[in-house]
Image: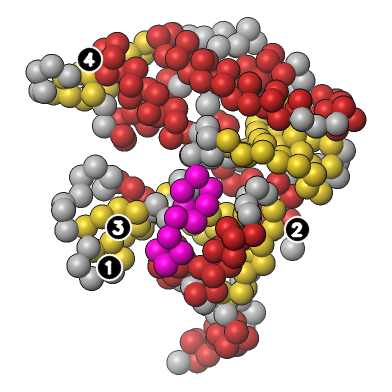
Amino acid sequence: MALMLSRFFSKSQALFVDVGSTMTRVVGSDGSVLFYEPTCLVLDRASNTTLSIGLQAYAALGKLPSQVRIIFPIHNGSVADTKVLTQYLRAVLDRINEPLSAVEFALGRKVQVAIPGTATRVQQEQFAVAWKDAGCRATFVNRSETVSYEGTRCLVDIGGQVTECSIVTDGSYVAAKKFLWGGIFLTELLQRYMRSEEGCVLGWHEAERLKRELGMVASSQLSVKDKRMAVRGKDVLQHTGKTALVQQSSLIPVLSKAAQELATELVSFFSQLPSEIVTGVLDSGVVLIGGGSQLGGLAEFLTEELSCPVRVAENPGLASAIGLRGKR
């Protein structure tokens, strides 16, 4: 009892949160990573109760019985279902199990949340409602402003479904553009390639593994050791199990073509900006964050295509959540 009271009246740990289309990151005020798992939950169809979230829910993708369903509450960077998002956030907070202070118990847990710079007023209100209904007092920060750099920089946040390109000057948001390009797009691309070229239908998790292990784009700055790996799927014609041996060199042209689409989108965005801003970007460079930025050779490829320095931020998947903590 004494322990419970001491936790109740003690100062609670602040939470810094980035809920993306595919991944949710929660960092504590002490810098600890409290939650870093997929943004999804499994619900019972009859009772609508939450059965699992995060990694456990994601592992069930493609294997669920008919009486349950898996839901991703964020779609293309926007709230797909406010009530489901609220349900998911409550489950995440329960998993973290951080104690509430007396003030937070009365007024709600205090959290800082990174949201897309391209979010409309309606979308911002949806995020606000979901967090409020989850029992939180949320402060929202433009995701592009969570990563601080001096001068003018282009911050490219490559998520699972959406890439957001933002111009930041001395830590302040200037302009942004959102387009559909991300890790899910690349995984689906590899699934189509394996089906058409190898006659092998890969499940989602196997295609994700292939992307992580062999995914790379072409760059003159990189020397490629032609790795290979075996993947297991279903034969297109026989509908039986099939093992395919995949060479990394066979995937590079496929992924490089996709990376070219990203470069084209970035150039199109730059063409709409004043020359002074573009010059600042060319001088200081582009910073990549988000899980999709970890595709092998992507930074080097974009450096050549954009004719400016491009680098991947330190700990790119957690960059926004960690950046929020730095702004407290």
- Quadrant hosting residue 140: bottom right
Q: Rate crowding at label 2 as few (under 14), some (14 to 19) or many (20 or more) other CA atoms within 10 Å.
A: few
Quarter occupied by the C terminus: bottom right
Tell me which residue sits at (62%, 17%) in the image: 301
**Mark 3 or mark 1, which is nearer the start of the sequence?**
3
Q: Amino acid at mark 3?
A: Val
In the depicted structure, whether residue 227 falls above or below residue 71: above
Q: Are marks 2 and 3 in contact (CB under 8 Å)?
A: no
Residues packed near mark 4 inside 10 Å, few (<14), some (14 to 19) or many (20 plus): some
The x, y position of residue 318, in whole percent, is: 59, 47
Give the mark nearest the N terminus, 2 or 3. Answer: 3
User: Vertically, is 144 above or below 204?
Assistant: below
SS class, disc 3: strand
> In whole angstroms, how far apart are the C-alphas of marks 3 and 4?
32 Å
Front residue of 232/75: it is: 75
Q: Which residues are magenta?
A: 74-84
Q: Secondary structure at mark 4?
A: loop
Residue at 49% across, 73% down = 134
| Type of amino acid at the residue the image marks with label 1 | Asn
- Read off the residue under disc 4: 199
Q: Amino acid at mark 2?
A: Lys
Q: How far across and down, in percent of the image, does residue 229 sit?
A: 33, 17
Q: Earlier in the sequence, mark 4 or mark 1?
A: 1
- Please give the residue where the numbered disc 2 appears in the rendered image: 327
Residue 254 lies left or right of residue 200; in this view the side is right
Report the residue marked by disc 1: 48
The residue under the point 46% across, 21% down is: 215
Towards the viewer: 5 or 263: 263
Identify whether 191 is placed above or below 16.
above
Q: Are marks 4 and 1 in contact (CB under 8 Å)?
A: no
Residue wearing tag 3: 42
Does 61 sit above or below residue 192?
below
